[in-house]
């Protein structure tokens, strides 16, 4: 068996499924692909800072095993031998899990998170642990443990968070797949800012463990460069796990490929207009999708405001009370914004929290009702493009709000409140050469429909989005 050596540019432009296909055909070596992944990651790290830690020895050792399996025809999945990254709030057996915090241990964990374990069982090779803000508490990309993670398209800019390093490393081309979690937009925000595909499946579809303090908001899912890769990861990692009781209710609604979809186009979600540079790219995308006939597209409005009061109530109490003991013991080394939530949470009475849960039920009734008429919704993922890397809010933003990051993410967190599937698809660059995302939202358990439609959109929008990797920041 004679392997082909890819140059780094070809590797970085490839999809995971394409790499896996060539491994299966005996063309590519998993060992060589891991060396490509590590080379790109190391080249970009000084400028981007996407990794809490790279794991070269472990990755090389596993790649040798995957190559031996491939030589013997023992392929575990369509992405056998492909390098990936895992967000550093998911457990990797034998590795520490820092979660972006100086309060966490350096001791290795003894068991992997379900998504990680299933991807490794599928034959992928984890090259490193991608950065996250402290305990994934916010939508920006900096933490006390790892500092600032920067956007590969412009290192003066933010990646978004909390799957900050995952979005960044996919955008650099170091890996075609990274794991993420999303309790308010944490997959879709960095996907939009970094020009990646970011898929938040239905709540519980991919099990989340260890559990979080906001478990009824928290989803696990992939960040990738191509929709096919996101679909492959979903197929390999979805399904119940007893450690996440919410996953017991995961259902996959089949897709009818011949169905003519009714898709509502929302230009100003929840009455919040996007900035001009986002609107321009989004409008061009909708024109192209209309011309391509991908669905029956109808412009609609969402006749209610973004449910910020509900999200604030759930998030402030969950994080503020959930981390109260840690904050009391270690406030001086923690993110000040996270530490502040412990004080804010004290203002919520049991009656206040009960009122929030009732408001959530009413919102979810409305959100589920949207899909009595529409099969899917499309809208911008974010109302803005990436802003300053060190900032918590864009210029002129609400830095004094209880959750400053929620004030600039009004299109993402509502669908964590409802638990419905949502995917961010890159649709091109703004006039400042920063990525813009289109969000596809579906009804509960319509994950396959969201992925299928995203694939159609990806093909139709290819002229707007000719490259999936950012220009190299390395020398």
Image: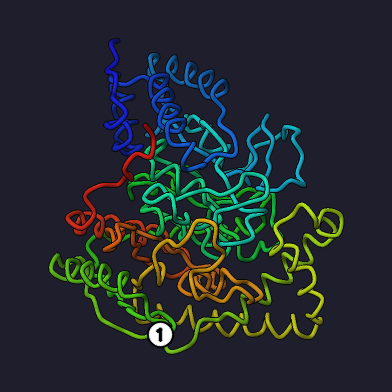
Q: Position of residue 146 (x, y in %)?
A: 62, 44
Towards the viewer: 332 or 228: 332
The residue sitting at 36% across, 86% down in the picture is 301
Q: Position of residue 139 (x, y in %)?
A: 55, 62
Q: Position of residue 221 (x, y in %)?
A: 50, 52
- Residue 71 occupies which quadrant of the picture? top left
Q: Is residue 93 left or right of residue 383?
A: right
**In the orientation shown, which residue stands out farthest toward the top?**
1
Colouring chosen for the image of the structure:
rainbow
List the residue tagged with mark 1.
302
The residue sitting at 53% across, 82% down in the picture is 365
- Residue 41 occupies which quadrant of the picture? top left
How many numbered marks are there?
1
Towards the viewer: 270 or 160: 160
Q: Quadrant of the C terminus?
A: top left
Q: Position of residue 101 (x, y in %)?
A: 70, 48
Q: Is residue 204 left or right of residue 459?
A: right
**In the orientation shown, which residue stands out farthest toward the left?**
291
Q: Pointer 1: residues within 10 angstroms few (<14), some, or many (20+)?
A: some
Q: Quadrant of the N terminus?
A: top left
The residue sitting at 81% across, 59% down in the picture is 327
Q: Is residue 140 left or right of residue 233?
A: right
Compared with 93, 340 (above or below) is: below
Q: SS of the residue at dot 1?
A: loop
Compared with 363, 133 (above or below) is: above
Q: Is residue 148 left or right of residue 444?
A: right
């Amino acid at each position: 068996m004679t392997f082909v050596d890819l140059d780094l540019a070809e590797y970085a432009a490839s999809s995971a499924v394409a790499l896996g296909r060539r491994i299966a055909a005996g063309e590519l070596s998993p060992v060589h692909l891991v060396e490509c992944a590590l080379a790109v990651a190391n080249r970009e790290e000084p400028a981007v800072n996407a990794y809490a830690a790279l794991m070269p020895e472990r990755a090389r050792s596993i790649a040798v095993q995957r190559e031996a399996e491939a030589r013997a025809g023992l392929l575990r999945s369509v992405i056998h031998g492909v390098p990936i990254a895992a967000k550093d709030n998911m457990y990797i057996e034998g590795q520490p899990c820092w979660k972006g915090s100086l309060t966490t241990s350096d001791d290795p964990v003894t068991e992997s998170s379900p998504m990680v374990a299933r991807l490794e069982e599928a034959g992928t090779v984890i090259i490193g642990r991608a950065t996250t803000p402290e305990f994934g508490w916010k939508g920006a990309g900096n933490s006390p443990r790892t500092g600032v993670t920067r956007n590969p398209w412009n290192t003066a800019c933010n990646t978004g968070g909390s799957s900050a390093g995952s979005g960044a490393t996919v955008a650099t081309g170091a890996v075609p797949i990274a794991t993420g979690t999303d309790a308010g937009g944490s997959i879709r925000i960095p996907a939009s800012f970094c020009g990646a595909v970011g898929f938040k499946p239905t709540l519980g579809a991919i099990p989340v463990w260890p559990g979080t303090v906001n478990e009824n908001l928290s989803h696990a899912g992939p960040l990738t460069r191509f929709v096919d890769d996101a679909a492959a990861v979903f197929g390999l990692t979805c399904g119940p796990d007893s450690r996440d009781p919410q996953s017991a209710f995961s259902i996959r609604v089949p897709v009818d490929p011949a169905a003519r979809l009714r898709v509502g186009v929302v230009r100003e979600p929840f009455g919040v207009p996007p900035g001009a540079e986002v609107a321009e790219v989004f409008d061009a995308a909708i024109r192209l999708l209309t011309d391509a006939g991908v669905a029956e597209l109808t412009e609609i409005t969402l006749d209610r405001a973004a449910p910020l009061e509900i999200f604030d109530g759930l998030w402030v109490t969950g994080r503020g009370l959930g981390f109260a003991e840690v904050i009391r013991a270690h406030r001086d080394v923690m993110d000040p914004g996270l530490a502040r939530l412990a004080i804010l949470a004290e203002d919520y009475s049991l009656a206040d929290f009960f009122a929030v849960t009732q408001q959530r039920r009413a919102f979810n009734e409305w959100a589920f009702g949207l899909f009595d008429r529409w099969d899917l919704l499309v809208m911008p993922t974010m109302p803005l493009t990436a802003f300053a890397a060190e900032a918590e809010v864009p210029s002129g933003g609400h830095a004094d709000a209880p959750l400053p990051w929620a004030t600039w993410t009004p299109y993402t967190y509502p669908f964590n409140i409802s638990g419905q599937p949502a995917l961010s698809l890159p649709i091109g660059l703004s006039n400042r050469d920063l990525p813009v995302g289109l969000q596809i939202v579906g009804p509960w358990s319509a994950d396959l429909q969201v992925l299928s439609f995203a694939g159609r959109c990806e093909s139709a929008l290819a002229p707007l989005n000719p490259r999936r990797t950012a220009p190299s920041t390395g020398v």
